[in-house]
Image: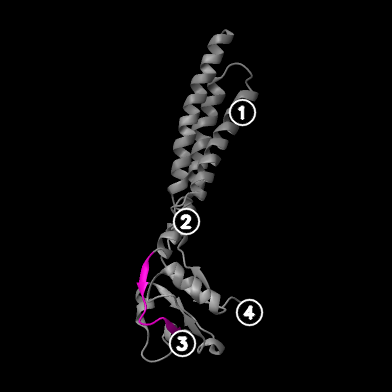
Amino acid sequence: MNANNEDECWSYVFARLSVVALILGAIFAVVPVSYVFAPFVGLMVFTEPRVRHSIGRFRLAMPAIAFALANFACFAILTLAFFAPVKTTDDYLRRTMSLPKTKMTLGELSGFEEPPHMLLHLRGVSVSVPQDEIDVVIEFSATELTMRQFVDAVERQSTLRHRFGHCGNGSTILWGGDCSFGLHLRRPRQY
């Protein structure tokens, strides 16, 4: 095999490898995190032996270089997916909600006081208030606000902090956690 044919073979194999890496990277970004090993294993199984078999010149160096470049392509896709502004938690925090009044105690928000405030529970928000903060008044800017505005007001005026409950089977790199267990407001342990 002459040098031109080997270069053409290298170009063909690298192009195929790039397509496979891009497809597997995209799959890796959207499959649940508990299955993330599968695209990487697929990349190893489907590409490395083919590259090793197809490239004649530099038998040891070219497959390693091709495999490293394919992994870099996968890593680039996953990095873009990780930073993409399409996370489920951001969508959840953009939802709007209505409150009965602009000033409410944490006890009212958590349902400790009569009558229980069921609006938050229906929206997937759980508020756990320690006894020493039940009477803390939270002042909201309006009765119609986004979940993010609600969370920011509570966090700014109390020791409660928010956290989403996720199921690992539904979490992906592209969309993040699935918020299947809702939004929880509670005091962190360091307080």
* Residue identified by numbered label 1: 65
The nearer-to-camera label among 3 and 2 is: 3
Label 2 vs label 4, nearer the camera: 4
In the rendered structure, which segment of residues is drawn in magenta?
A: 95-104
The residue that mark 4 highlights is 191
Residue 152 horizontal/vertical position (percent): 50, 71
Q: Which mark is residue 107?
A: 3
Mark sitting earlier along the chain (3/2): 3
Residue 102 within the segment the image draws in magenta: yes
Judge by depth and name the residue closer to the eye, 1 or 179: 179
Neighbour class for label 1 at 10 Å: few (<14), some, many (≥20)? few
Which residue sits furthest bottom? 114
Front residue of 86/50: it is 86
Which quarter of the rendering shows the C terminus?
bottom right
Say above or below: 92 vs 132. above
Q: Whole-Å distance between the Cαs marked 4 and 3?
A: 19 Å
Mark 2 and mark 4: Cα distance apart in space: 28 Å
